[in-house]
Image: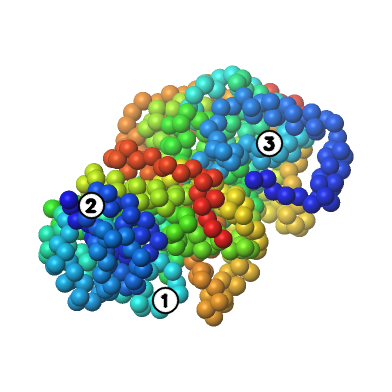
């Protein structure tokens, strides 16, 4: 049963459609073609079991792709190293707002062959945010509970986890490109599901919104996990979190495969986590050495 | 022929189940209200579970199996009566089952008892803790009832106890809370939230109960239907109109209107409109080869407004 629209709304929609520049419409077609190549089990209403809705995701991908191509002018290297089938992408995490996750998702869709739909494992507070919760679900992101992650990997999906979590996203300017403490849950899940881990080094995001201080207590009062103070936030309101036009360099490492029991003691798991960390650090070091400047 | 006793037989689901079981069982039932025009094969007793007369029914009927679905799930009743019927009534029934040698017991709990929490994983299995009382204290009696029945699994292992937790049940006959919610013309929802919701048709719930009896199931089982859609899609497909309101406004409205008796849903319901409560029905499917007959579209169309 289609939703009935009045003549006025339809006319307005048509007008809006006509005003969209040709390049954006072409982009939409390009994204749609890539999305079509991804096999996703959908029900009669176009949803997958976790609330992913490719038709909505497509619309949401347009602004991300515009950012990817013309704002962050992202460059990827080594994306062909991502194996087919189940895989866990483990990038660094920074920048106050998760643009790094979004850009990684765009890269997997537009640059990987065949295109992959990346399922981001989100923070626990995302489902609590109005609109954000729906937008995240429709584009395939899920709350990062171990059960969700395990189910997706067992379904041979491409899952992105951010072991730094909020610690990474809200790191200070002085801590840029220094990986924060990693959780160990992701590695236990990789062992349990026998999934390869692809380390990813994202250069750029760590400078997109330099944070000078983190007023965590105030953040907690406002129900946020952190309260960054940057040259523009909170002085310019929410817009103050808009990132600088840094150039993104997304470097993929060789897949790491670990053997062992998921219920090994922390000491054993920590060693594996250390290997992933070192791989990401190496990718970041390379990326930083190669780039000409923050914006170039 | 085996004899089945259905408690709460005059409710929508009870009537359907009685009809469904008549072919293979001798069916008797109890309810607080009469069932006018019940099928000839069904023996109907108009008694309250909490009353002494109910024990007489079990003593004379001596059923070999009992399906327990005599619960108050709406909030129009006095909370104390609700608790009495749901918790004490169940306790009485369980004691009678032990005393009068009932061999099999099916208890109809619900999937709501897991609770709608932001950190819920998708597709929770039966081992997930029932956490509904955290944000939805109004249904803690149903959570307690579930625990009470679950305890009989190990306290009285010779009785084959089966605890079924179906997802949101919709249909023409059944009176479910989610049915009442979706039957409204204008439906308040939470602005900016659209969680996935699972549905099952009332006839498929009957089928699931019949399968549980047939397989002599013992244990706790989630029962899931053909699939899930976001709540706004469900509203649209059942022909309603969603009115998204900001959460603080919605909370105030629910609280006030419910307190004044002008609104059938307490504030705790709001979390179910925000966060998904999705169950994995794998265990039940593996045990019984259950496959729902009705698809989502048919489920939505079966909702009469």
Residue of label 3: A58
Of the image marks 1 and 2, the number of the one nearer the N terminus? 2
Residue furthest bottom as drawn: B260
Select label 3 or label 1 by which is in front: 1
Q: Is residue B167 visible?
A: no
Rendered view: B192 above or below B207: below
Q: Is residue A118 visible?
A: yes
Label 3 to label 1: alpha-carbon separation: 48 Å
Select label 2 or label 3 by which is in front: 2
Q: Where, quadrant-wise, is the C terminus of chain B in this rendering? A: bottom right
- Which element carries disc 3, helix, strand or loop? helix
Residue for point 69% across, 48% down: A3
Rendered view: A262 above or below A138: above
Residue of label 2: B25
Residue A157 relative to residue B49: left or right: right
**Is label 1 on the same chain as label 2?**
yes
Answer few, some or many: residues within 10 Å of disc 3's Cα (few below 14, many 20 plus, some between 14 and 19): some
Answer few, some or many: residues within 10 Å of disc 2's Cα (few below 14, many 20 plus, some between 14 and 19): some
- Looking at the image, which is closer to me, B78 or A108? B78
Rendered view: A82 above or below A57: above
Q: Are marks 1 and 2 in contact (CB under 8 Å)?
A: no
Residue of label 1: B77
């Amino acid at each position: 049963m289609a939703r009935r629209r009045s003549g006025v709304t339809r006319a307005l929609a048509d007008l809006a459609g006509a005003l969209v520049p040709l390049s954006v419409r072409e982009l939409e077609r390009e994204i749609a073609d890539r999305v079509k190549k991804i096999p996703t089990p959908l029900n009669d209403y176009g949803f997958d079991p976790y609330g992913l809705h490719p038709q909505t995701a497509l619309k949401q991908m347009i602004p991300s792709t515009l950012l990817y191509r013309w704002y962050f002018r992202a460059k990827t290297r080594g994306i062909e190293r991502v194996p087919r089938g189940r895989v866990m992408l483990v990038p660094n995490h920074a920048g106050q707002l998760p643009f790094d996750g979004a850009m990684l998702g765009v890269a997997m869709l537009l640059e990987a062959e065949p295109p992959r739909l990346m399922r981001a494992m989100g923070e626990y507070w995302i489902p609590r945010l109005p609109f954000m919760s729906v937008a995240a679900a429709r584009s395939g992101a899920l709350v990062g509970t171990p059960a969700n992650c395990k189910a997706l990997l067992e379904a041979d999906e491409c899952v992105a986890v951010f072991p730094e979590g909020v610690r990474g996203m809200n790191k200070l300017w002085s801590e840029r490109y220094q990986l924060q403490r990693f959780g160990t849950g992701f590695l236990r899940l990789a062992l349990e599901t026998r999934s390869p881990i692809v380390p990813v080094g994202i250069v750029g995001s760590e400078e997109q919104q330099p944070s000078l201080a983190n007023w965590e207590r105030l953040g907690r009062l406002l129900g946020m996990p952190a309260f960054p103070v940057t040259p523009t936030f909170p002085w310019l309101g929410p817009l103050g979190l808009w990132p600088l036009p840094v150039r993104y360099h997304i470097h993929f490492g060789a897949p790491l495969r670990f053997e062992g029991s998921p219920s090994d003691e922390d000491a054993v798991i920590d060693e594996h986590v250390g290997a992933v960390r070192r791989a990401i650090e190496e990718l970041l070091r390379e990326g930083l050495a190669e780039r000409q400047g923050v914006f170039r | 022929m085996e004899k089945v006793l259905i408690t709460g037989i005059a409710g929508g689901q009870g009537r359907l189940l009685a009809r469904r079981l008549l072919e293979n069982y001798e069916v008797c039932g109890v309810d607080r209200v009469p069932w006018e025009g019940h099928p000839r094969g069904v023996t109907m007793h108009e008694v309250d579970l909490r009353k002494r007369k109910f024990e007489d029914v079990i003593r004379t009927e001596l059923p070999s199996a009992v399906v327990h679905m005599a619960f108050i799930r709406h909030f129009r009743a006095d909370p104390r009566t609700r608790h009495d019927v749901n918790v004490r009534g169940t306790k009485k029934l369980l004691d009678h089952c032990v005393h009068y040698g009932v061999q099999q017991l099916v208890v109809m709990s619900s999937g709501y008892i897991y609770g709608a929490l932001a950190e819920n994983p998708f597709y929770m299995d039966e081992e997930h803790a029932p956490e509904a009382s955290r944000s939805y204290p109004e249904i803690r009696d149903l959570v307690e009832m579930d625990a009470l029945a679950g305890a009989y699994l190990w306290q009285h292992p010779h009785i084959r106890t089966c605890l079924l937790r179906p997802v949101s049940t919709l249909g023409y006959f059944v009176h479910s809370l989610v049915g009442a919610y979706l039957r409204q013309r204008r439906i308040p929802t939470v602005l900016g939230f659209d969680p996935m919701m699972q549905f099952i048709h009332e006839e498929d719930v009957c089928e699931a109960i019949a399968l549980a009896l047939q397989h002599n199931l013992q244990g706790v089982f989630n029962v899931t239907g053909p699939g899930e859609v976001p709540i706004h899609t469900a509203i649209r497909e059942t022909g309603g109109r969603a009115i998204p309101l900001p959460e603080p406004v919605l909370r105030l409205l629910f609280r006030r209107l419910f307190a004044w008796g002008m609104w059938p849903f307490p504030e705790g319901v709001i979390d179910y409109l925000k966060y998904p409560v999705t169950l994995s029905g794998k265990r039940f499917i593996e045990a019984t080869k259950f496959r729902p007959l009705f698809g989502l579209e048919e489920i939505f169309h079966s909702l009469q407004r």
